[in-house]
Amino acid sequence: MTKAVLILAGQRAGVADPLCDAAGVSHKAEISVAGISMLDRVIAALHTAGLSKNIYISGYSGSALNEVESGDGPADSVALGLSDIDQYPCLVTTCDHALLTAEMVQAFVEGAEAAGTDICVGLASKSVIQAAYPETQRTYLKFSDEAVSGCNLFYIANEDGLKAIAFWQSVQHLRKNPLKLARKVGVAVGVKYAAGRLSLQAAFDYASDRIGITAAPVLLPFAEAAIDVDKPSDLVMVENILQVRAS
C-alpha cells in the first residue's frame, strides 16, 4: 500500500470559478455534492480503502489534513508537495474527484503495484465511459488501440517518479492538445500519434525512454473514475450519479 496520499485542492489565482461562485464558497474543496463536500467525499473513499494515515493536501487550508506547499498549477503543486512529504509510494488525486470510491482506489493501487514502475497514471477507456455515460464530454487521448481519458489518479513509487513530474511541468499547458504533447516527447512519436499508429503502451514506453524512468498506464474499469467536477454541468451529472448510487 501507499505510504502517503496527496490531494490537490488549489485554485488558479485571479481566475473566477463559476462553481465556487454559484456555491458561495472560495474553494472547490468546499462545494457540496449531494449534501457532502467534494473533499470529504474523497477523504471518505481513501479511508474506506484503508488509507487513513499520512494524507496531505495542497492548496487548501480549511481542513484538518496536513497542508503542504502549493504551486501555480497541478504539476508544480505535485512537485512541491512531494518534496515536502518525501514518502513513497505516494498516491496523488484531486479534491474534485467526487465520485471516487474505495474500489477505484484499491484497483488503481493494485494495478500500479503490479506494474512495478516508477510512476503510474490512472486512465479509463472511451468505450467504458461512453457505454455508461454517452452524454458526458471528456478529453480523450486517441491511440491506435485505445482512446483514454485521465482519472486524476497518479502513483509515484519512488524519487525517480519525480522526473515524470518535472516533464509534466514542462508540458502541462499542452494537455488539451494531444498532438503537440506527443511531439514534445519526440518527432517520431508525434508522427505516429498523428497517423493513428501509436499504441497506448508504446506511448508510455516512448515517454519512459525520453524521461529516463519507467512508467505505465493503469486502465480502470470504472467510467466514474474519469468524471470529475470541472463545470456546472459536471456537478449536475455527478449529483445524478450519486442519487442513483444511493437508491
Image: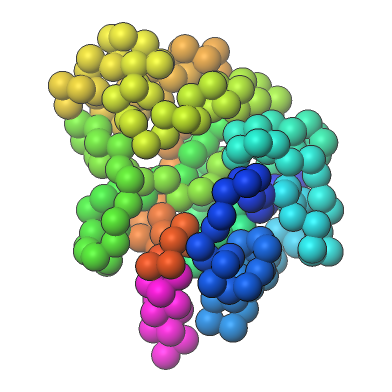
Which stretch did the figure color magenta? 235-247
Q: Is residue 70 left or right of residue 191?
A: right
Question: Which residue is found at the position 34% from the left and 16% from the top?
Answer: 183
Quadrant location of the C terminus in the rendered image: bottom left
Please determine whether, in this image, residue 38 is positioned above or below residue 199: below
How many marks on residues? 0
In reply to whether residue 165 is colored magenta, the answer given is no
Please determine whether, in this image, residue 90 is positioned above or below residue 63: above
Q: Is residue 106 visible?
A: no
Residue 121, percent from left and from top: 49, 39
**Residue that extends furthest to the left in the rendered view of this protein:** 195
Please determine whether, in this image, residue 150 is positioned above or below residue 176: below
Asked which quadrant contains residue 163, the reply is top right
Question: Which residue is found at the position 54% from the left and 58% from the top?
Answer: 17
Question: Which residue is found at the position 38% from the left and 67% from the top?
Answer: 233
Question: Which residue is found at the position 65% from the left and 36% from the top?
Answer: 72
Residue 209, percent from left and from top: 46, 13
Q: Is residue 53 left or right of residue 246?
A: right
Looking at the image, which is closer to me, 234 or 103? 234
- Determine the main secondary structure of the stretch shown in magenta: helix
Looking at the image, which is closer to me, 118 or 195? 195
Please determine whether, in this image, residue 30 is positioned above or below residue 221: below
Asked which quadrant contains residue 134, the reply is bottom left
Looking at the image, which is closer to me, 105 or 170? 170
Residue 106, percent from left and from top: 56, 57
Residue 55, percent from left and from top: 76, 54
Q: Is residue 244 visible?
A: yes
Q: Is residue 91 left or right of residue 116?
A: right
Q: Is residue 102 left or right of residue 88?
A: left
In reply to whether residue 245 is colored magenta, the answer given is yes
**Residue that extends furthest to the top in the rendered view of this protein:** 187
